[in-house]
Amino acid sequence: MIARLLSYAALIVAVILVLFPVYWMLATSLKLPRDILRVPSLWPSRFSLANFEKLLADGQFLLSIRNSFIVASTVTVISVIISSFAAYSMVRFRYRFRGVIGRLILFAYLTPGSLLFIPLSIVMAQLKLGNSLQGLILVYLTFSLPLSTWLLQGYFRGVPRELEEQGMIDGLTRFGALLRITLPLSAPGLAAVAIFTFTGAWNELLFALVLTTSESVRTAPLALNYLITSDVLPWGPLMAGAAISSVPLMILYFVAQRFMVAGMTEGSVKG
């Protein structure tokens, strides 16, 4: 009985620690500007949408949300497709330097992004992709592809090779076996990888800050960063922007939470 009570108490504390920052963000976004800098209160004295109206007045923040959605969606689709083929080849085929390639993929994922600012800036400038969404997509792929490939190898190893061989006996090609057997059986893993990739691309700030300058190509995190223009932080619009930019991720995780749990559990067992 005592152990169960302690477990419930620990869960309650964990939930409070996780949800309180979210609640504080929402509460601050709904406060009147004059109330935000007064004595902190857990509940707005008067609910107001003034912060949201100020943030959305010129439409630039909604444009940044659209840019983030375009970049994150494109990176996710391309990354999942390419990494599926890459991970499958490393799991099912035997060829020279396969182990070296696998280590290079992991090394690419572990390389600190701060070391690549200057090289990637030079490459983007030479490709004439600087200050563009296409350039951001290409840069984000250099980080999402290694992680996606590394994760999907664990899921593909959990699919019995015999199922593919049986399918090929029944007339499927190797490509058909991948599409009709391996990928459907790895659906939870694919969903988990897609969500991780989308989240990483949606929240990324540093490369967007370095590689883009025009207001028309800013992503949501970058638009929030540019709201800070002086020593006085505009907490109201900042919290309103954070709340708006969190909605797509909340919806995504709510819809796909079943796949997330299944995917992470299978990956931990099969990897």
Image (cartoon, rainbow, N blue to C red):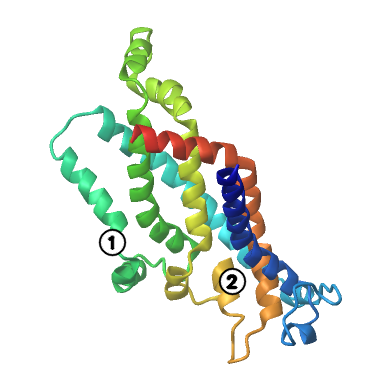
What residue is rendered at 24% in x and 54% in y?
A: 107
Residue 257 at what x, y percent from top left? 59, 42
Position of 229 with respect to 83 (left or right) is right
What residue is rendered at 31% in x and 74% in y?
A: 118
SS label for mark 2? helix
Q: Residue furthest front?
A: 2
Residue 174 at what x, y percent from top left? 33, 21
**Does residue 26 show up?**
yes
113 over 10 or under it: above or below? below
Position of 188 with respect to 250 (left or right) is left
260 over 18 or under it: above or below? above
SS label for mark 1? loop
Q: Marks 2 and 1, Cα distance to the nearest angstrom?
A: 30 Å
- Amino acid, disc 2: Ser
Q: Which numbered marker is on residue 111?
A: 1
Q: Which numbered marker is on residue 42?
A: none
What residue is rendered at 59% in x and 71% in y?
A: 216
Q: Nearer the viewer, mark 2 or mark 1?
A: 1
Which quadrant of the figure has residue 243?
bottom right
39 over 63 or under it: above or below? below
Mark 2 / mark 1, whichever is N-terminal? 1
- Amino acid, disc 1: Thr
Which residue is tagged 2? 216
Q: Nearer the viewer, residue 186 or 57?
A: 186
Q: Count the marks.
A: 2
Residue 187 at what x, y percent from top left? 49, 31
Which quadrant of the figure has residue 35?
bottom right
Q: Residue furthest left?
A: 96
Residue 109 at what x, y percent from top left? 31, 55
Q: Nearer the viewer, residue 128 or 95?
A: 95
